[in-house]
Image (tube, rainbow, N blue to C red):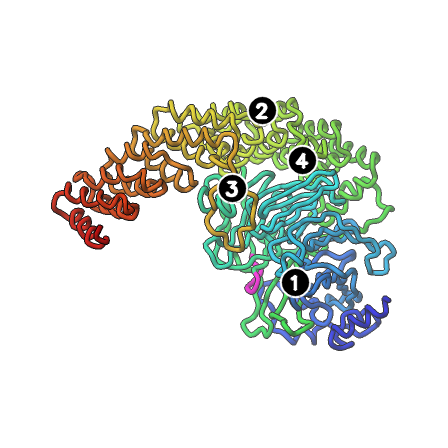
Amino acid sequence: MRAALVAVRLLACGALAACPLSLARGQAPQTGPETEQRFPPLRVPEGFKATLFACDPLVEYPSAIALGPRPGSIFVAADYMTGLGTEIIRRDEIRLIEDTDADEYADRATVYADEFNSIEGLTWHAGTVYAMHSPFLTALRDTDGDGRADERRDLVTGLGLPPEQNPVRLHCANGLVMGHDGWLYLALGDHGCDVQRPEGDRLVLEGGGILRCRPDGGGLHVFATGLRNIYDVALDDDLNVFVRDNENDGGDYKIRVCHSFFAADHGYPYLYYERPDEALPPLADLGLGSSAGGLSYHERQFPAEYRGNLFFCEWGKAVVRYRPQRAAAGFSPLSEIEFAAGADNDPYGFKPTDLVVERDGSLIVADWADGQQPKRGRGRIYRITFPGGQAVAPVEDSHELGLADWIAQLDSPGYHQRLLAQETIAGRGPEGLAALRDALSQGRLGVPARLHAVWILARPGGPAAIDELFELAKADAEPRVQAQAVRALADLADPVLVAHRLDAGPGDAELAASLATWAEGKDPRVLLEVVVAVGRLGWRDAPGWLRDTLASPDAALSHAAMQTLRRSGNWTAVLELVDLPENQPLRAIALGAAADQAVPELVEGLIGRLREEPDAQRRRQYADLLTRVYKKPAAWVYWGFRPPPRPPNTVAWESTGTIEQALNGALADPEPAVRLAVLRRMQREKIPTRLATLGAWLGQEIDADRLAAILESVREHPAGETRKPLEQVIRSAEKPAPSRLTALDMLTAGLDAATEGRLATLAGSLDDGPVLAEALRQLARRPAG
């Protein structure tokens, strides 16, 4: 059977000499200096060198790449389905591409695993390859060392849609990365997910965002929402999360680079258009394009200017970079810099899809090359280096090294080496923990080492680890380490992860209070992590603490505080924040927290304030919040690649009638601007108006804009009920002629045989002018009775 499958693949390759499978059988190297002459070199900054590490026939359709198990090796996903046709199912494969003779050119390709859906994400960690191919996250291992995976397990099912339901394979399960915090970060397109978790409950996300899960697929939860179609997640040395979102197919939602954190909502698609202040703003809002893979550069091979940079693929254009700079709790706005681009005379065109950093610090770039259809065998892998750059000498994973040696490696300038040291020390169990604690107590670890030590201490979990991490945060003077410790203990204390249930309820209130007390006066980076942590714990006292703590929060802290207020569930306290003076930042944050929250207690408080508030602007704000929860959203239907305007909510709930009554009362507000704003919002959300209230308003209103809005709502009522208020408008010489003419058209359209005479009677009561002229014209057009 295996021989038959191989024969089929050989035929599919078009010719035996072009089939990558044959290269593992002793053929001559297929990439080298001569092969490199087929293409003009990449354009890279001065001092850098781009080498064609691999091309056809070793690779084709390279959609995603990952670090390989050894230096000089990478895993490459071949996405046949995107290239050869949407009718192909389970055709993708993962190849192991290797430079076996250390000449910096690949010379061998073997199929590591096959029979995948469209692979959009790939990563390797501790001997396991993880592949994202909708609707699966799959883990693979080669346990016998023959270069082919012999263990395969689908860890998660329900990420995006299967190819049978989504032939184009877009906007589903995309990239993934393993953080040194022990979490897999999953980039999810806006088809969302519907996952039956291993814990037994169901995780549903309507739209795009970031998910996290453990290496075994457990603990899956939503990390961030409101993203359109990110293809990757980039983590910096401090595990700050960055993404580069895709524009909406030529629309006005552009490429956006974002800093993200737990519970962040980035606003796509509706907050982005309607309520941008309630979304976490991006660091860069760019033009049209198509973003693909990305990463944060941790190594030392590139010059200092490039370390800590974000690198992302812009399909069909270039590899671009950004230089994140801390600013309070967040980051300063980013500027885009081109890093690597194809030559103008490149016969394929440069279409980068993914990136990975090798152990020596070189940047590996996957290039889809030309459109390929119906051609086969195209694709390139580039290796970009900075000759003469600092090389971090690798330390092999050897049991002959002592724990003291590995602990020293936690301060290595190279991230790969620090990560290897972290994994090795953690793998030594109690012995490793004891040695690490000793090094910490003696002050022998630098900041990089302490950042990794946090996650070694966190790995055993439980209350003891929480206490130890909190003590580390208190004792360490470095804000970066403090922030990491708080993030780690938040993971350990989060009730969703402790109880293994998405509906677990609040967590440890005493821990939340202790964190809050300790956080006073801390660096904004630390404060951000504490605000997020107490939100994850569902701390009911968070509103009062935030009021006393956040004197002048930046955008990141404000957004985190808004989400924490929601998670507190203490709506009475949130409403008290709404009562604060305008110059208090927590008032605006509380208004954002109350938005779109269909909670009876909150609705009742807003209605009371709407009736009693003396300030017109505040009454307008309360009415606006009420219109947003008049009804709840219907069952989610995918909005498409370029969403139309948000539809009004359609599902009535227990407060629907009460809200309708309160808003109709607001149409009699003493301030005309408030009445108009409320009416516009009621029209937008399809909230029925009372004709008696509209009629009374019509009788006294003379402003043309307000009259137009009122008449628009009058149209929604039965014609037989609107004749009297319409005639009142038509007869009033004080009202603008355009408003009277609109009312006349509405009246005429609603007349029937039994009421024809009203038009003649009305015309007889009008003074000479355009309204009378139009009434007479309408009479002349109507059949004689």
Instruction: Please identify, in this view, whether the residue under mark 4 or under mark 3 is nearer the observer.
Output: 4
383 vs 621: above or below: below
Pick the quarter of the image with the N terminus: bottom right
Residues at marks 2 and 1, CA–CA distance in whole angstroms: 49 Å
Q: Quadrant of residue 518?
A: top right
Callout 3: few (<14), some (14-19), or many (20+) C-alpha neighbours within 10 Å?
many
Q: Which residue is mark 3?
A: 280
Residue under circle 2? 540
Q: Amino acid at mark 2?
A: Arg
Q: Position of residue 359 (x, y in %)?
A: 72, 55
The residue mark sitting in front, 2 or 3, is 2
Mark 3 and mark 4 in contact (Cβ < 8 Å)? no
Q: Is residue 582 left or right of residue 523?
A: left
Q: CA distance from mark 4 to mark 3?
A: 24 Å
Residue pointed to by mark 4: 502
Q: Secondary structure at mark 1?
A: strand
Q: Earlier in the sequence, mark 4 or mark 3?
A: 3
Count residues near mark 4 (Cα–Cα under 10 Å), then give few for <14, some for 14-19, many for 20+. Answer: some
Q: How many discs appear?
A: 4
On the image, the x and y values in percent for residue 360 come to: 71, 56
**Secondary element at image label 4:** loop
* Residues rendered magenta in the picture: 315-320
Q: Position of residue 14 (x, y in %)?
A: 73, 76
